[in-house]
Image: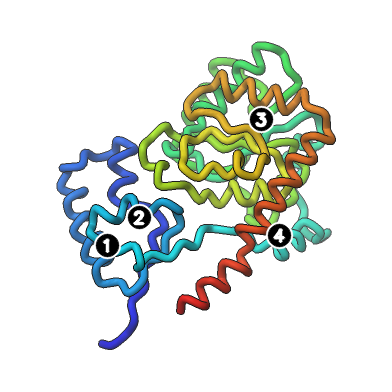
Protein backbone atom coordinates (compact mmCIF):
# COMPACT_ATOMS: atom_id res chain seq x y z
CA UNK A 1 0.00 0.00 0.00
CA UNK A 2 1.27 3.44 -0.90
CA UNK A 3 3.88 2.21 -3.40
CA UNK A 4 4.30 4.07 -6.68
CA UNK A 5 3.42 2.02 -9.75
CA UNK A 6 5.17 2.43 -13.11
CA UNK A 7 4.31 0.22 -16.07
CA UNK A 8 6.63 -0.54 -19.00
CA UNK A 9 5.15 -1.79 -22.28
CA UNK A 10 7.64 -3.85 -24.27
CA UNK A 11 5.10 -5.37 -26.67
CA UNK A 12 1.50 -4.47 -27.39
CA UNK A 13 -0.65 -7.32 -26.13
CA UNK A 14 -3.06 -8.62 -27.28
CA UNK A 15 -2.66 -6.50 -30.44
CA UNK A 16 0.49 -8.36 -31.49
CA UNK A 17 -1.36 -11.69 -31.45
CA UNK A 18 -4.29 -10.18 -33.35
CA UNK A 19 -2.17 -8.52 -36.05
CA UNK A 20 -0.07 -11.66 -36.47
CA UNK A 21 -3.27 -13.58 -37.14
CA UNK A 22 -2.85 -15.86 -34.12
CA UNK A 23 -6.20 -14.89 -32.58
CA UNK A 24 -9.17 -12.74 -33.62
CA UNK A 25 -9.98 -9.47 -31.87
CA UNK A 26 -13.07 -11.12 -30.35
CA UNK A 27 -11.27 -14.26 -29.16
CA UNK A 28 -11.79 -14.88 -25.40
CA UNK A 29 -8.04 -14.58 -24.86
CA UNK A 30 -8.00 -11.18 -26.57
CA UNK A 31 -10.92 -10.00 -24.44
CA UNK A 32 -9.16 -11.25 -21.30
CA UNK A 33 -5.92 -9.46 -22.20
CA UNK A 34 -7.81 -6.25 -22.96
CA UNK A 35 -9.28 -6.29 -19.46
CA UNK A 36 -5.83 -6.74 -17.89
CA UNK A 37 -4.36 -4.13 -20.24
CA UNK A 38 -6.84 -1.41 -19.29
CA UNK A 39 -6.63 -2.28 -15.59
CA UNK A 40 -2.83 -1.91 -15.56
CA UNK A 41 -2.67 1.22 -17.72
CA UNK A 42 -5.26 3.14 -15.72
CA UNK A 43 -3.58 2.41 -12.40
CA UNK A 44 -0.04 3.22 -13.52
CA UNK A 45 1.37 6.59 -12.50
CA UNK A 46 3.56 6.55 -15.59
CA UNK A 47 3.65 4.25 -18.62
CA UNK A 48 7.07 3.70 -20.17
CA UNK A 49 6.80 2.92 -23.89
CA UNK A 50 9.41 1.68 -26.36
CA UNK A 51 7.51 2.73 -29.48
CA UNK A 52 7.33 6.44 -30.42
CA UNK A 53 3.71 6.39 -31.55
CA UNK A 54 2.35 4.28 -28.70
CA UNK A 55 -0.20 6.93 -27.77
CA UNK A 56 -2.05 6.28 -31.02
CA UNK A 57 -2.68 2.83 -29.57
CA UNK A 58 -3.15 3.69 -25.89
CA UNK A 59 -5.69 6.45 -26.42
CA UNK A 60 -8.29 3.77 -27.18
CA UNK A 61 -7.89 2.82 -23.51
CA UNK A 62 -8.66 6.46 -22.58
CA UNK A 63 -5.14 7.03 -21.24
CA UNK A 64 -3.83 10.59 -20.89
CA UNK A 65 -0.85 11.28 -23.13
CA UNK A 66 0.92 12.97 -20.20
CA UNK A 67 1.25 9.54 -18.57
CA UNK A 68 3.53 8.26 -21.33
CA UNK A 69 7.33 8.36 -21.24
CA UNK A 70 9.19 7.25 -24.38
CA UNK A 71 12.38 5.28 -23.64
CA UNK A 72 13.37 2.99 -26.55
CA UNK A 73 15.72 0.04 -26.52
CA UNK A 74 19.39 0.76 -26.92
CA UNK A 75 22.97 -0.48 -26.77
CA UNK A 76 25.62 -0.23 -24.08
CA UNK A 77 28.11 1.15 -26.59
CA UNK A 78 31.09 1.13 -24.24
CA UNK A 79 30.48 -2.52 -23.29
CA UNK A 80 29.85 -3.46 -26.94
CA UNK A 81 33.23 -2.02 -27.95
CA UNK A 82 35.02 -3.74 -25.06
CA UNK A 83 33.61 -7.11 -26.13
CA UNK A 84 34.81 -6.45 -29.66
CA UNK A 85 38.34 -5.82 -28.40
CA UNK A 86 38.39 -8.70 -25.90
CA UNK A 87 40.93 -11.21 -27.26
CA UNK A 88 39.78 -13.89 -24.83
CA UNK A 89 36.41 -14.13 -26.61
CA UNK A 90 36.64 -16.57 -29.51
CA UNK A 91 34.15 -17.23 -32.27
CA UNK A 92 33.15 -20.78 -33.13
CA UNK A 93 35.65 -21.82 -35.79
CA UNK A 94 33.05 -22.66 -38.41
CA UNK A 95 31.35 -19.26 -38.13
CA UNK A 96 34.67 -17.41 -38.20
CA UNK A 97 35.84 -19.30 -41.29
CA UNK A 98 32.52 -18.64 -43.02
CA UNK A 99 32.65 -14.92 -42.29
CA UNK A 100 36.23 -14.55 -43.46
CA UNK A 101 35.49 -15.66 -47.03
CA UNK A 102 33.46 -13.62 -49.52
CA UNK A 103 30.64 -11.13 -49.04
CA UNK A 104 28.39 -11.99 -46.12
CA UNK A 105 24.87 -10.91 -45.12
CA UNK A 106 24.25 -11.53 -41.43
CA UNK A 107 21.09 -12.12 -39.43
CA UNK A 108 21.27 -12.73 -35.68
CA UNK A 109 18.28 -13.40 -33.48
CA UNK A 110 15.00 -15.24 -33.28
CA UNK A 111 13.67 -17.18 -36.26
CA UNK A 112 9.93 -17.02 -35.70
CA UNK A 113 6.81 -15.95 -37.58
CA UNK A 114 7.28 -12.27 -36.72
CA UNK A 115 10.82 -12.28 -38.11
CA UNK A 116 9.59 -13.22 -41.60
CA UNK A 117 12.76 -15.05 -42.58
CA UNK A 118 11.02 -16.42 -45.68
CA UNK A 119 11.79 -13.03 -47.24
CA UNK A 120 15.50 -13.49 -46.51
CA UNK A 121 15.63 -17.09 -47.71
CA UNK A 122 13.80 -16.36 -50.95
CA UNK A 123 16.02 -13.32 -51.56
CA UNK A 124 19.02 -15.63 -51.08
CA UNK A 125 17.48 -18.04 -53.57
CA UNK A 126 17.12 -15.27 -56.18
CA UNK A 127 20.72 -14.19 -55.62
CA UNK A 128 21.93 -17.80 -55.81
CA UNK A 129 20.16 -18.35 -59.11
CA UNK A 130 21.91 -15.29 -60.52
CA UNK A 131 25.29 -16.62 -59.34
CA UNK A 132 26.37 -13.67 -57.21
CA UNK A 133 29.17 -14.42 -54.73
CA UNK A 134 26.99 -13.44 -51.78
CA UNK A 135 26.29 -15.67 -48.79
CA UNK A 136 23.76 -15.52 -46.00
CA UNK A 137 24.67 -16.39 -42.43
CA UNK A 138 21.80 -16.87 -40.00
CA UNK A 139 22.60 -17.23 -36.32
CA UNK A 140 19.78 -18.09 -33.94
CA UNK A 141 16.91 -20.40 -33.08
CA UNK A 142 13.16 -20.33 -33.40
CA UNK A 143 10.01 -22.15 -34.43
CA UNK A 144 10.57 -21.52 -38.15
CA UNK A 145 14.20 -22.61 -38.34
CA UNK A 146 13.68 -26.30 -39.13
CA UNK A 147 11.19 -25.52 -41.91
CA UNK A 148 13.50 -22.95 -43.50
CA UNK A 149 16.50 -25.29 -43.32
CA UNK A 150 14.43 -27.99 -44.98
CA UNK A 151 13.40 -25.57 -47.73
CA UNK A 152 17.03 -24.65 -48.42
CA UNK A 153 17.96 -28.35 -48.67
CA UNK A 154 15.10 -29.23 -51.01
CA UNK A 155 15.55 -26.18 -53.26
CA UNK A 156 19.38 -26.26 -53.24
CA UNK A 157 19.67 -22.79 -51.75
CA UNK A 158 23.30 -23.43 -50.88
CA UNK A 159 24.34 -19.85 -50.19
CA UNK A 160 22.56 -19.91 -46.80
CA UNK A 161 24.17 -21.32 -43.67
CA UNK A 162 22.32 -21.69 -40.36
CA UNK A 163 24.14 -21.65 -37.03
CA UNK A 164 22.86 -22.23 -33.49
CA UNK A 165 22.39 -19.40 -31.04
CA UNK A 166 25.60 -18.05 -29.56
CA UNK A 167 26.48 -16.06 -26.46
CA UNK A 168 25.45 -12.42 -26.70
CA UNK A 169 29.04 -11.59 -25.74
CA UNK A 170 30.41 -12.70 -29.12
CA UNK A 171 27.77 -11.01 -31.28
CA UNK A 172 29.95 -7.88 -31.71
CA UNK A 173 32.76 -10.02 -33.20
CA UNK A 174 30.34 -11.81 -35.52
CA UNK A 175 28.92 -8.51 -36.75
CA UNK A 176 32.37 -7.01 -37.13
CA UNK A 177 33.35 -9.72 -39.64
CA UNK A 178 30.12 -9.37 -41.63
CA UNK A 179 29.59 -7.03 -44.59
CA UNK A 180 25.93 -6.08 -44.20
CA UNK A 181 23.03 -6.99 -41.89
CA UNK A 182 19.40 -7.87 -42.52
CA UNK A 183 16.08 -7.10 -40.85
CA UNK A 184 12.82 -8.59 -42.13
CA UNK A 185 9.30 -8.31 -40.73
CA UNK A 186 5.71 -9.12 -41.50
CA UNK A 187 3.65 -6.55 -43.38
CA UNK A 188 1.26 -5.79 -40.53
CA UNK A 189 -0.50 -2.76 -39.07
CA UNK A 190 1.16 -3.24 -35.68
CA UNK A 191 4.35 -1.49 -36.77
CA UNK A 192 2.55 1.80 -37.44
CA UNK A 193 3.16 2.49 -33.74
CA UNK A 194 6.91 2.09 -34.31
CA UNK A 195 9.58 -0.56 -33.76
CA UNK A 196 12.46 -0.98 -31.34
CA UNK A 197 14.35 -4.08 -32.50
CA UNK A 198 17.38 -4.80 -30.29
CA UNK A 199 19.20 -6.52 -33.16
CA UNK A 200 18.85 -3.39 -35.29
CA UNK A 201 20.70 -1.31 -32.69
CA UNK A 202 23.43 -3.96 -32.48
CA UNK A 203 23.85 -3.87 -36.26
CA UNK A 204 24.17 -0.09 -36.33
CA UNK A 205 26.50 -0.06 -33.34
CA UNK A 206 28.74 -2.44 -35.31
CA UNK A 207 28.76 0.01 -38.24
CA UNK A 208 26.99 -2.37 -40.61
CA UNK A 209 24.76 -1.13 -43.44
CA UNK A 210 21.30 -2.64 -43.03
CA UNK A 211 18.70 -3.85 -45.49
CA UNK A 212 15.55 -3.00 -43.56
CA UNK A 213 12.34 -4.67 -44.71
CA UNK A 214 9.70 -3.17 -42.44
CA UNK A 215 6.73 -0.84 -42.87
CA UNK A 216 6.98 1.32 -39.78
CA UNK A 217 6.42 4.89 -38.65
CA UNK A 218 9.99 5.20 -37.31
CA UNK A 219 12.31 4.03 -40.07
CA UNK A 220 15.67 4.42 -38.33
CA UNK A 221 17.61 3.22 -41.37
CA UNK A 222 16.10 5.93 -43.54
CA UNK A 223 16.49 8.57 -40.80
CA UNK A 224 20.17 7.71 -40.34
CA UNK A 225 20.87 7.02 -44.03
CA UNK A 226 22.46 3.80 -42.78
CA UNK A 227 21.28 1.28 -45.35
CA UNK A 228 18.39 0.56 -47.69
CA UNK A 229 14.76 0.48 -46.58
CA UNK A 230 12.31 -1.64 -48.57
CA UNK A 231 8.73 -2.82 -48.24
CA UNK A 232 8.32 -6.00 -46.18
CA UNK A 233 7.62 -9.49 -47.55
CA UNK A 234 9.15 -8.71 -50.94
CA UNK A 235 12.10 -11.06 -51.64
CA UNK A 236 12.88 -9.46 -55.01
CA UNK A 237 13.29 -6.02 -53.46
CA UNK A 238 15.48 -7.49 -50.73
CA UNK A 239 17.64 -9.27 -53.30
CA UNK A 240 18.01 -6.03 -55.29
CA UNK A 241 18.94 -4.05 -52.17
CA UNK A 242 21.56 -6.63 -51.17
CA UNK A 243 23.06 -6.63 -54.67
CA UNK A 244 23.14 -2.82 -54.61
CA UNK A 245 25.17 -2.87 -51.39
CA UNK A 246 27.36 -5.68 -52.73
CA UNK A 247 28.21 -3.66 -55.83
CA UNK A 248 28.67 -0.42 -53.90
CA UNK A 249 32.15 0.99 -53.40
CA UNK A 250 33.55 -0.23 -50.08
CA UNK A 251 34.18 3.35 -48.89
CA UNK A 252 30.52 4.24 -49.46
CA UNK A 253 29.42 1.17 -47.52
CA UNK A 254 31.78 2.15 -44.72
CA UNK A 255 30.39 5.70 -44.65
CA UNK A 256 26.87 4.27 -44.48
CA UNK A 257 27.85 2.11 -41.51
CA UNK A 258 29.48 5.07 -39.77
CA UNK A 259 26.30 7.11 -40.12
CA UNK A 260 24.38 4.34 -38.41
CA UNK A 261 26.90 4.26 -35.55
CA UNK A 262 26.58 8.02 -35.03
CA UNK A 263 22.80 7.71 -34.95
CA UNK A 264 23.05 5.08 -32.20
CA UNK A 265 25.51 7.20 -30.23
CA UNK A 266 23.13 10.16 -30.40
CA UNK A 267 19.84 8.37 -29.77
CA UNK A 268 20.25 4.86 -28.37
CA UNK A 269 23.24 4.75 -26.05
CA UNK A 270 21.99 2.86 -23.00
CA UNK A 271 23.79 5.27 -20.63
CA UNK A 272 21.63 8.16 -21.82
CA UNK A 273 18.47 6.04 -21.75
CA UNK A 274 19.16 4.93 -18.17
CA UNK A 275 19.66 8.58 -17.21
CA UNK A 276 16.18 9.35 -18.57
CA UNK A 277 14.75 6.46 -16.55
CA UNK A 278 16.48 7.64 -13.38
CA UNK A 279 15.07 11.13 -13.81
CA UNK A 280 11.61 9.64 -14.17
CA UNK A 281 11.97 7.68 -10.94
Counting residues from the start of the chain, the first of labels 2 and 1 encountered is: 2
- For the residues carrying marks 4 and 2, which lies nearer the camera in this image? 2
Task: Return the residue nearer the eye: 3 or 80.
Answer: 3
Q: Which mark is residue 278?
A: none
In terms of secondary structure, where does tag 3 sit?
strand
Q: Report the number of numbered marks.
A: 4
Task: Determine the image quadrant of residue 103.
Answer: top right
> Circle 4: is it few (<14), some (14-19), or many (20+) Cα within 10 Å?
some
- For the residues carrying marks 3 and 1, which lies nearer the camera in this image? 1
Query: On the image, numbered disc 2 is attached to which residue?
Result: 55
Outermost residue on the bottom side: it is 2
Q: Is residue 85 visible?
A: yes
Q: CA distance from mark 2 to mark 1?
A: 8 Å
The vertical placement of 149 against 74, above or below, is above
Residue 147, position as x, y percentages in the image: 47, 29
Query: On the image, numbered disc 1 is attached to which residue?
Result: 63
Q: Is residue 92 visible?
A: no
Q: CA distance from mark 3 to mark 1?
A: 44 Å
276 sits to left or right of 39: right
> From the image, which quarter does the N terminus lie in?
bottom left
In terms of secondary structure, where does tag 2 sit?
helix
Mark 4 touches mark 1? (CB < 8 Å): no
At horizontal 58% and vertical 45% (from top left) the residue drawn is: 220
At horizontal 69% and vertical 61% (from top left) the residue drawn is: 77
Query: On the image, numbered disc 3 is attached to which residue?
Result: 136
Amino acid sequence: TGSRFFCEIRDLWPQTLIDMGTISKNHPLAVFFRIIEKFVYKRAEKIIVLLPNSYDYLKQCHIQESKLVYIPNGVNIEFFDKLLEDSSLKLPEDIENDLNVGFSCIYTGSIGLANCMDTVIKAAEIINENEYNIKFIIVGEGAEKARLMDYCRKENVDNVTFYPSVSKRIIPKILDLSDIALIASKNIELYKYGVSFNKLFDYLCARKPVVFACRTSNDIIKAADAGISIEPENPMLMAEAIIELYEMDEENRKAMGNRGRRYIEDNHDIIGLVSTLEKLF
